[in-house]
Amino acid sequence: MNLDNNAHSVFLLQYHLVLVIKYRRQVFDDGISSRAKEIFEYIAPNYNITLEEWNYDKDHIHILFRAHPNTEISKFINAYKSASSRLLKKEFPQIRQKLWKEHFWSQS
């Protein structure tokens, strides 16, 4: 078991995050999923987060990641959802045809 540590503690915090497309629209394929993963890996180090596992289906993604105790998970998730929504809609115009209005991620 690989434990994380800082100056005064040893810890292992793992989170399982499921992000769902608004109205369960079937948007994800291999290319879109790999780009969404790249965006996650780009933003994660700024919040002391390490990606452990990434899986997807056509209408949602499963992310298993590790974080430090002082990580602000809600700020990270908001940053990831807004950046990935904006970039994926920009880089893959076919996504806009499957969505209603401009919403990409479900609020849940």
Image (cartoon, rainbow, N blue to C red):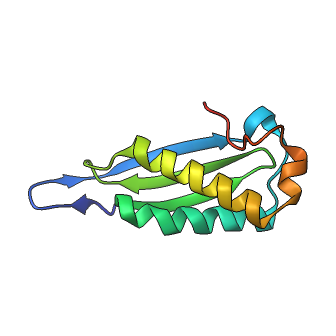
Identity of the residue drawn at 74% across and 36% down: 22
* Percent position of residue 20, x then y: 69, 40
Q: How many marks?
A: 0
Q: For the N terminus, which image quadrant? A: bottom left
* Percent position of residue 107, x then y: 62, 32
Query: Which is nearer the eye, 23 or 61?
Result: 23
* Percent position of residue 23, x then y: 79, 32
Q: Quick check: 7 left or right of 89?
A: left
User: Is 42 drawn above or below residue 93 in the view shown?
Assistant: below
Query: Which is nearer the eye, 28 or 5?
Result: 28
User: Is 30 drawn above or below residue 58 in the view shown?
Assistant: below
Q: For the C terminus, which image quadrant? A: top right
Query: Which is nearer the eye, 13 or 100?
Result: 100
Q: Quick check: 83 left or right of 55?
A: left
Q: Residue furthest left?
A: 8
- To which quarter of the image does residue 49 belong? bottom left
* Percent position of residue 55, x then y: 67, 55
Identity of the residue drawn at 84% across and 37% down: 100
Query: Which is nearer the eye, 44 or 2?
Result: 44
Identity of the residue drawn at 49% across and 46% down: 77
Q: Quick check: 62 left or right of 47?
A: right
Identity of the residue drawn at 63% across and 56% down: 84
